[in-house]
Amino acid sequence: LLFQWLIFPVTPKLITHNSFFPNHVLRVTTHNIAVACETRLSTVVNGTSPGPELRIRSGETTWIRVYNDMESQNLTMAREKDPQHANKRQHWHGLSQRTAVFSDGSPQGSQWPIPPGHFFDYELRPELSDSGTYFYHSHVGVQALTAAGPLIVEDCGKPPYRYDEERILQWSDFFPQTDEELQSGLEAVPFVWSGETSAVLLNGKGIGIGQNLSEDGGSCTLPVIDVAPGKTYRFRFIGSTGLSLVSMAFEGHNNLTIIQVDGGEWTQPASVSHMQLGSGQRFDALFVAKTKRELEAEKRTAYFLQFETRDRPAVYRGYAVLRYSKSAPLPKQPAKAPLRLPNTTYDWLEYQLRPLYPEPMGHPTLAEVTRRVIIDAVQMVNPTSNHLIWRLANLSWTGDEVQTPLLVDIYKRGDAAMPNYDAALSNHGWDPKTRAFPAKVGEVLEIVWQNTGSLVKSGGAVDMHPFHAHGQHFYDIGSGNGSYDAEANEEKLVRMGYKAVKRDTTMLYRYSTVTNPGAPAGWRAWRIRVNQPGVWLIHCHTIQHMVMG
């Protein structure tokens, strides 16, 4: 879905010269890569998946050139014929492009796709308050399953928490089908589901279902996290999964402390016994390694990180090794799970995270809200095309309907291309002509995501959705079962003295696996003071759901 904060368009001056050199270069190609004990034709960045780690400075301008080196294909706009695998866009997930709106990388929103054999120079200028953990990924089809990598915005000064070193833990899903096979199936009539994840990977490594650990290395090995005794680490958890909500915990260690969420928002320390990570989410946590004395007493040099998928029809369980000594042999995958992870997901850290540096105004109160936009997520069969689709507020978005990216169109045609605000108010919040949700700078919006039972075959199945906002971060004011009751939730916030943190991705949970078709089945509420003009996507970050609308 496109949200567009209304402003008067201004045409920038065109500047060209031949002495420009970007700070970073990313080249996107397709290669057969060894992953999860198999070989898969995948979209990769600089030859690897995940792609290279990028580090940039807050308060400075960084230019990143992205080449599309994938082979050319004949492209049409018909969704059933064109998976658009040759096109490319790069999104800087979670990083607000408030000063470089054309560099957001959103499909048919802020820029044209990058055709094969071409490049695009992205301008990133994070503010001082943006330091934190992000990631970059393709925003075309299902390419983000493999075309993704960590993006770290470094602090200019000392961070508010002390630690010795840091580690990146980037999580992704593995599907054995090619990108084209996956997307073609999701867009086919009859519908062909991708299947559940065949492996959850940590930093690109993991064991596929039905595969055995390899003794000689390669892709069929357990991922390893190296730590030294007695040190404190900043673990940067990055959820770049396509489908999976992952629950995880360290064997013999229960001292994780959340210190930052979704980049930029430092939190008061929040101790957790296990982590939970949805697609698009990031959490930074302090991890205190055992001392040499503790290791000697336990006679161990390695422990397992156990991780499992949640709220899916099948559970994938995997392991990584937390290693204290590189000279010691790696343990084999355990025959029996050493940990018992919680099955419930919907109460993890809800109404618990609080900002370390609260803003003077805090999150908007219910009395400040000028407009509420309710967006219900509905799975259904398109009565015209017979495609299985997702609709949000009665709108299914694939980008195929847009001939020119909305932001480009506004700069070319001015007011004639602007969404009709009044028309949107009487049409679920979106303008029928541009298919965008307009908002005015200065408005205080309350966006309510409403889960529902599936309409497909009158089944009433309920799914979970990690909803993500491009651009300005929002205040997450909670979630619950059934339908949203604004007054009851506001009373809860006041009673708790709760100060909401800013997020860019939060979960719309499911509270049961099935309900009546179309029945309310859970909600998530955001509030936002609109102050960053631009064209921004808001969408479910489950990749299959994005393809389905």
Image: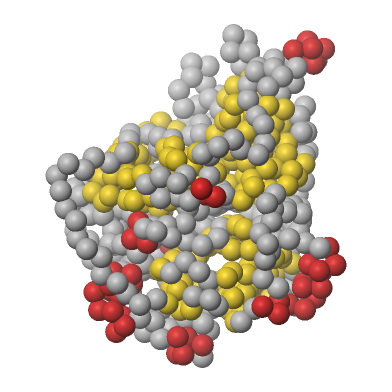
Q: Quadrant of residue 354?
A: bottom right
* Residue 380: percent from left, percent from top: 53, 74
**How many labels, in total?**
0
Q: Nearer the viewer, residue 224 or 89?
A: 89
Residue 394 vs residue 66: left or right? right
For the C terminus, the quadrant is bottom left
* Residue 440: percent from left, percent from top: 48, 78
Give above or below for 61 relative to 543. above
Q: Quadrant of residue 534?
A: bottom left
Going by the picture, which residue comes out furthest to the left?
Answer: 18
What residue do we see at 33% from left, 60% from top? 102
What residue do we see at 25% from left, 65% from top? 12
What residue do we see at 51% from left, 48% from top? 128
Q: Nearer the viewer, residue 288 or 144?
A: 288
Residue 546 vs residue 524: left or right? left
Give above or below for 357 relative to 36. below
Colour scheme employed for the rendering of this structure: secondary structure
Instruction: Evaluate whether residue 350 shows in this view.
Output: yes
Q: Nearer the viewer, residue 488 or 100?
A: 100
* Residue 133: percent from left, percent from top: 54, 43
Give above or below for 274 relative to 343. above
Instruction: Evaluate whether residue 513 shows in this view.
Output: no
* Residue 140: percent from left, percent from top: 36, 56
Residue 277 vs residue 42: left or right? right
What residue do we see at 43% from left, 40% from top? 56
Q: Nearer the viewer, residue 147 or 369?
A: 369
Going by the picture, which residue comes out furthest to the right?
Answer: 495
